Amino acid sequence: MTANAECPINGRFVRVAILSGLLVLLAHIVAHDAATYYVWGTGWAFIHSVTYYRVILTIWATVILLTPALCFFILLKPGAVETYSRSFWTFAYIAFLFHLYWAIFGICQGNLKAIFHGHAGHEMIPGCTVEHAGPDFALAILWGFDIALLWLVRQDYTWIRRFTGFVHALVFAMFVKALMAPKASRGAHLIGMLMAGIVLSAYMTRVIFRQPDPKSFGVFVYVTLFRIINRIRIVVGRRLVFVLGLTAFEPTRRRNRRGTGRTTTSRRRQRRCGAPPC
């Protein structure tokens, strides 16, 4: 990040805010209509509540907002604070909070014990099945802290830039993993593949056409990884040379021992017989 004299709340921010608000509102409207349709329809084995569809559709809205946020972040010039990246990143987090709200206080009724017991929570509260509650809460905290830094800190600090890159990578990885999980629907799989394809394409474009930023999280990971590999190579190489040296020296040492033994025996005989040798 760099200090930016431009007001962060401008026309681009307002446009993204309106788009995000309409998207989240549409998710709630479609959730209500979908639940109503399934209640009135016939021949369906399972009927889900409005809250269930709110949980599903708000996470889809989060993905729709998160994808351009990640792409804008990847394609930014080093150190730049771009309004679209910050805006999409912020409102994607707000949509994610809607998802957490309906999951925690809607389906699970605010029962943290049921939330953190995984599949056992379904027995406490029907429908409350959260497999990875701890990572989800940790992600929400890290994401919120990153947004706070993004809006409040206007100076270019290396650790903030690396932390922001780490949070972006973590959010991308966790969302793709959740969308591509075996239990997820075909629609979720399709959205996950589209998200991964678009973001990875943006990253490859950045790698091919842009110079790497030495302060970025990616370069930090790349350099750290090669330092670790180089350190392992040096340590293993030294031990290997030491072991090979001992192996090569062992026959010579044995021959020297035999030669020393013969010389000592000859001298003992000379002492018993006197000089010259008997």
Image (tube, rainbow, N blue to C red):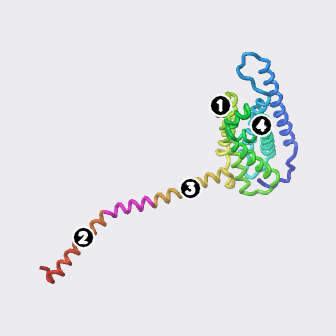
Determine contact: label 3, label 1, CB under 8 Å: no
Q: Helix, strand, or loop for circle 3?
A: helix
Crowding at mark 2 (Cα within 10 Å: few <14, some 14-19, many 20+)? few
Q: Which residue is mark 1?
A: 183
The image position of residue 55, as x and y in percent, is 76, 33
Q: Which residues are magenta?
A: 239-250
Q: Which residue is mark 3?
A: 228
**Above or below 64: residue 243:** below
Q: Residue at x 32, y 63 (%)?
A: 250
Q: Callout 4, which amino acid?
A: His
Which circle's residue, 3 or 1, is located before the other in the chain?
1
Q: Which residue is mark 4?
A: 99
Picture quarter containing residue 11?
Answer: top right
The answer to whether 209 appears left or right of 14 in the picture is: left
Mark carried by residue 48: none
Q: Nearer the viewer, mark 2 or mark 1?
A: 1
The image position of residue 7, as x and y in percent, is 87, 50
Q: Which residue is mark 2?
A: 259
Question: Is residue 64 visible to the viewer in this orientation of the structure?
Answer: no
Distance Cα–Cα, label 3 vs label 2: 46 Å
Residue at the farthest top position: 42
Distance Cα–Cα, label 2 vs label 1: 75 Å
Distance Cα–Cα, label 3 vs label 4: 39 Å
Please check the rendered image and state whether residue 207 is part of the magenta-colored stretch, yes or no.
no
Q: Nearer the viewer, mark 3 or mark 2?
A: 2
Q: Callout 3, which amino acid?
A: Ile
Picture quarter containing residue 25?
Answer: top right
Q: Residue at x 49, y 59 (%)?
A: 235
Crowding at mark 1 (Cα within 10 Å: few <14, some 14-19, many 20+)? few
Q: Helix, strand, or loop for circle 4?
A: helix
